[in-house]
Each structure stands twice: as C-alpha cells, then as structure tokens.
Image: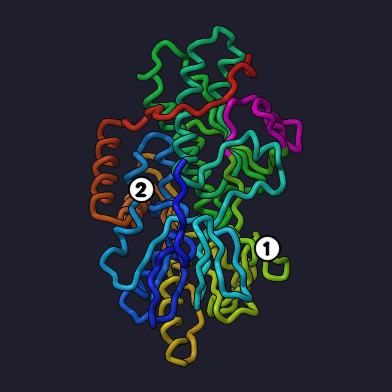
Amino acid sequence: MFKFGLMSALNIPKSSFPRVIIIGGGFAGIALAKELSKKEVQVVLLDKNNYHTFQPLLYQVATGGLEPDSIAYPIRKILQDYPNFFFRLANVEEVKIEEKLLQTNIGPISYDYLVLATGAETNFFGNKEIEKNGMVMKTIPESLNLRSMILENFEQALLTDDLHQRDALMNFVIVGGGPTGVELAGALAEIKKGILPKDYPDLDTRRAQINLVQSGDRILKEMSSKASEKAEDFLEKLGVQVWKNTRVVSYDGKLATTKTELSFECATLIWAAGVKGASIKGLDAAELLVRGNRIKVNEFNQVVGHDTIFALGDVAGMITEDTPMGHPMMAQPAIQQGKNLGYNLIRLLENKPLEPFIYKDKGSMATVGRNKAVVDMKNYKFQGVFAWFVWMFVHLFFLIGFRNRMIVFVNWVYNYIRFDREARLIIRPYQRDYDRFR
C-alpha cells in the first residue's frame, strides 16, 4: 500500500493577498467565490464533492426524470478562469478558532477569513429508528439510492404471490408536506399513472399507493393558503392520499406508525420532514447555535463574537425582528447572502463600513406534476399551467452551465410529449433485506 505525504496548507501557494476559505460549494459558496473572483484576495474553496448540486431538482433524479449529471456541475469548471482561486476536495473536520486553522482529512490550512457555507442536512429530530430505516434525498447519491429502491420494489413485487406483501412493496409514504414532499409525491403519482402500467403489464400497479403525511394542518405551509389548497387539490386528483395533522413517530422498515391509530405498512418511507444546519466541530458550541442547528450571525453574516468568521445560507441563523426564525433555507437567500458578503469582504479590507444584508423575497413556488404548479410572488399568486411554465423557466435559468440547461430542457420536452421518464435505471442496486416483508 502506498502512502503519500501531504504538503502543508494543502499545497496552496503563499500569497500576499489575504486568504478567504469557503467551506461548501453550494449556492452560497459559489455566489461568494464568483463575487471575489477578480479581487485581490486568495480564495480557497473546500468541499467533499467536486461538483455543485442543483438541489431543487433532486426529486427528478430520484424518480427517473433526469440523470444526475444534468443537475451537477464541476466546481473547478465554474471558477476555472478566475485568478487566485483554488479548490480542494476535502472534508473539514474541525475549526481551531484561536489558531485561525482548519483541520481537514487531507491536512491543515490557515485562513485570514473563514466562511461557512456548509448548507443543511436532514433533521430526524432525534428519531434514530426513522433515521436508520427511512430514505432521504439531500444529495445525488441519496437520490440514486432512492431511485434504485423504488424500481427494485416493483421488481420484488413481481416475484411474490402474497398480495399483502405485494401491496407493502408498492406502498410509498412521504413524510413532510413542504416543497420536496409535494413535488416528490406528484412525480411518483405520475409514474404510477403513465409509466408503471407499461413497464409492468403483469403487475396490478393500480394498487400502488402514494401517501403524503403532514404534521400540520396544511401542506406548503410557507406559501399562501391558496397555494396550499390548490396543491392539495392537484395531488388528490393525481391519486395521492394527503394526511394532515398526522405525525409519524416510528418506522421499523416495514410498519410506519403515527401518534393516532393510523399506520402504514410500507417498504418505503421517505423522510422530507425537516432540515438543520450542517455545523462543524469548533463552531458547534451551544452559545453559537440557534434553532435548527444554525450558527448565529449578525446582519453582516459575521458569526457572533468572531469578526473574521462568517456563515451563509442554510447554516446561517440571522435572527432579527423581521426574521425571528431566520431566513428561509432556500437557494435565493443563500445566493443573495453570498453576493452581499463578497461585497462586504472587500469593504472590510478597505476599512470601509459594512452593508447589512437585506433579503429581497422573489417569491416561492412548487410543481405538483405535469401542467400543475403553484407560484407565490409579492404581488401575484397564480396556479396551474402558467405557474408550471414559470416554474420551469426559473429552474432552467438558475441551472449552472449551458449543457445542463439544454439537457434538462430536452428531457422535459421529451418527457412531456412521450409521457415518459427514460432514466428509470438501477445502475447500482440499493442493498436491503427483502426477506423481512415475507
């Protein structure tokens, strides 16, 4: 076995420019790096993946509508023409604040300014059983796992004569009525309606069930009541069973139980009920965290008590009178914070006063399936076909890379005309014990 010695500072050259280290290549990290691209600073971006993921379309990877490379883009290619930019594939293990040092799995590196843009991770609210047995969809590998398992369940359903077991394999429970849960439920319902009967003619796919379980009294609770009502109506017309005021409390891999007498026997439970900030050791002390495991920052995105450390996007908890819960954990706040911090870091180096971050809410939207979407804007709220076209345009616009935009657009047009999803492939089987359903 060969062992290669790692050079100090991750083999990044010394510079007379101040070093800004960005942890995370998501929306916030990329926006900040672009803003600093031609300034007199050395930018070092660290991420455990070498690609940026367009997370709003992960559900389409999970349901066979898109291949993963159409919603991912190499970080190096995004920033390859920028001077003084360096990328390293690394896991950050700890921040040593007093030493202004990061400890990573490939070695230590010092910083002048540190920016946490680590995003969010799934929040199971301490439920270890659901964490062990449920499926999640926050990354591309997780989406591919879910795609494989969905298809494997139907392959297994073909192999059993036990009707009870077959129904469990075709029963899907999605926990969480936010945009992720709603969009995933709509996509699964369309697969059931238009694709499964053709792929599995010797299987009664009409018995497949899609259940959307929401603990509150309405789905899409962050949107208007009109959007919530219309989205629920769309889902029910697609055949999705929407369960409100229902909280799932356990799932052993076979049976999901709730606080009421309701239970679901299912082979697949997808947890979309919450996220939390992905904090890092050294910046995870209780006094630095607010609700949702987010790091407390001021109006300039500075971590409270630390003038040279900043947090952006989902991991940043900017608590004000206007935002008592912090900003929404979505792409737009992250992008806007990244741009604002880039502007402020240059002002900081020039000893100029910083500009506070002011979020410009551009609205929210969710698609429920073919020709069905809901859009809430500041002065306009609309639903249906026009909202669906707006949703598609916005998502295409924010995808990174001309190739990705073209591939996604062509896939959407093809899927719309043919009512098909060609990427329903089991590339790497998801290992699970199907014997427990017998």
In the rendered view, tell whether residue 12 sits above or below residue 213.
Answer: below
Going by the numbered disc 1, the residue's amino acid type is Arg
Residue plotted at (51% across, 82% down): 356
In the rendered view, tell whether residue 280 sits above or below residue 250.
Answer: below
Magenta part of the protein: which range?
250-270
**Position in image of residue 50 (x %, y %):** 39, 53
Q: Is residue 377 visible?
A: no
Dot 2 lies on which element?
A: loop
Q: Name the residue under label 2.
A: 71
Residue plotted at (56% across, 75% down): 309
Residue 132 shows which numbered tag?
Answer: none
Q: Can residue 126 be seen in this view?
A: yes
Residue 331: quadrant of the picture = bottom left
Residue 377: quadrant of the picture = bottom left
Going by the numbered disc 2, the residue's amino acid type is Ile
- Residue that protrudes farthest toward the top in the picture: 161
**Position in image of residue 95 (x %, y %):** 60, 66
- Circles 2 and 1, Cβ within 8 Å, touching? The answer is no
In the rendered view, tell whether residue 8 sits above or below residue 17.
Answer: above
Q: Mark 1 points at which residue?
A: 291
Left or right of 56: which side holds 278? right
Query: Mark 2 and mark 1: span between their CA atoms?
Result: 30 Å
Residue plotted at (42% across, 35% down): 63
